[in-house]
Image (spheres, rainbow, N blue to C red):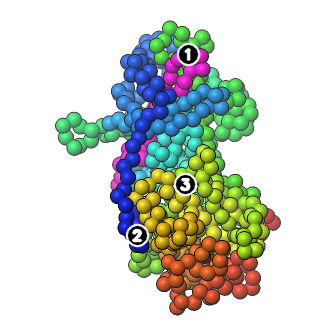
Amino acid sequence: MTLLFTSCVEEPEAPSLELSETPQLAQVREWFEANKTKLRLPERSSNFRTESQELILPFFEKEPDWDQFHHYFFPDGREVFEVSLENATKYFPKSMLDSFPDRNPADFVIQNIMFIKNLTDNRFDPLIARYFPNNRNSEMDFNSISYNAINEFWEGKVDLLTYDEHHLVTFEFSPNDERKVIFYGKDILPNTRTQGDCYQITREVVYYTPIEGTFGIEINTTTITETVCTGAAGEFPTAGTVYVDGTYYYDGSELDPSGSGCGSCDYNPPSAPAPSEFIINQLDNECAEIIFIELGKGANKLTDLTGLGSLDIFPWMLDLFKKGGKFYYYIEDVNLPMNSNGTRPNARTITPDSEGYITIQLDNSYIENATSLSIARTIIHETVHAYIMYLSKTNYEFVIELNNYYICHNNNVNDAHHGMMSQYLLGMAVSLYNWDKNFGPTSGNLGFDYYYKMGFGGLLKNGTSDPISDIVPLIPNGDWDAIATTLENEATANSLAKGIKENCNE
């Protein structure tokens, strides 16, 4: 990320980040070190189906990166520590070669080990979770995705395997909210209550392995068969489809056809629910919801500079919505309270709650009366606020720069945010232009100067209608009144607005 350091104070030295294990994680680590040589199923036993075309990937030693972990609980109360696995070998579907041309798809595979605490015994049974994105908009880092929190814009597959690489189930997240649950090569699905039509497809898994003593890599492939079955209610399990006891898709006892489990095994894989989806979008207004989804799922289209010439835009701003889907926040529509000056805000962004979630709130009366262009502009603006809040908790370099703005603006947080956002004004205008060109009713035909004026929206001194000092030099011809009038026209959808007020509920 590139920042302009235009500070009015001397920058302090960047602090160092110190990571330490929690006492609970230390206990997990101690248990793993004592038991990791025992965590494998017998190679010749009735407790797994040797006769099936089950996916069994080559086993490799697993060394968790204990500095990177997620901590959460399954719905039944079991505690989970999901820890990063940094290994030389990463597996991924061959389709990723097409999704990431000229790049190494293994770079975008996240593989973690979930330690699931047994409710009765002092043990932490592991499962392997691998996340395979379908496209660049779904690229994630470790901190941005976990089995209990997959944001609704993410597209790809999540594979769940035993510690020794026996495949259990795949969950596929596709566009248009389609979901699939995939079992590999099993002719009979013991986890099926109501089984509908089944079909088989082949899938080629590719994995890269470094060649020892060189900088080269060896490409290996494994072809497996997957059987996809639908239940009475469609592809994704609801009541009466492919799942066990209303929640679980896999239970360790299913490794034994008799259903008795494997009490004598050193490793008895735990059950696990389906991965949880983190729902960002909580909007009730249909127009605002459509715009938000377009901005999120169409993020890769917002960076297009075609026809705009050479513009000096921060890469961070052009990557805004790709980043925006990679931290936890909500967006909702509410009746916002009046400001101290008697006006009602169009929107606001609330600082993180106790769980670290940021909330963007759009005012109901505003979105009911504004043009779609104004609503898109507001969502872009508030998402910048949200990301600034996120970075202020996670990026020391960014914190130093934001602190400088804070001091320059008399310790006012709102003004500090808007001062920093002046650096991203051009990027916000490009994002708005590209949204209109790809999704909006005026198809990007309003002239770029108009989108640039719209980008100034909200960049005001706290509690006033005056522009923040940082943007004053950027105002075209110094005419703030012209910008304020344009913003008001679009916010009220009056006869002078160039955008269109759409009634999505008709």
Q: Which mark is residue 499?
A: none
Mark 3 or mark 1: name the one nearer the start of the chain.
1
Could you give the CA–CA distance between mark 2 and mark 1, rounded to whole angstroms? Answer: 56 Å
Question: Is residue 112 at least partly visible in the picture?
Answer: no
Q: Which residue matches tag 2?
A: 9
Mark 2 or mark 1: name the one nearer the start of the chain.
2
Q: Nearer the viewer, mark 3 or mark 1?
A: 1
Q: Is residue 133 above or below residue 210?
A: below
The amino acid on which the numbered mark 1 sits, given as a three-letter code, is: Asp
Q: Which residue matches tag 3?
A: 325
Q: Nearer the viewer, residue 449 or 138?
A: 449
Mark 3 or mark 2: name the one nearer the start of the chain.
2
The amino acid on which the numbered mark 3 sits, given as a three-letter code, is: Gly
**In the rendered structure, are the residues bearing label 3 and label 1 in contact, judged by CB atoms less than 8 Å apart?**
no
User: Residue drawn 71% across and 36% down?
Assistant: 238
The amino acid on which the numbered mark 2 sits, given as a three-letter code, is: Val
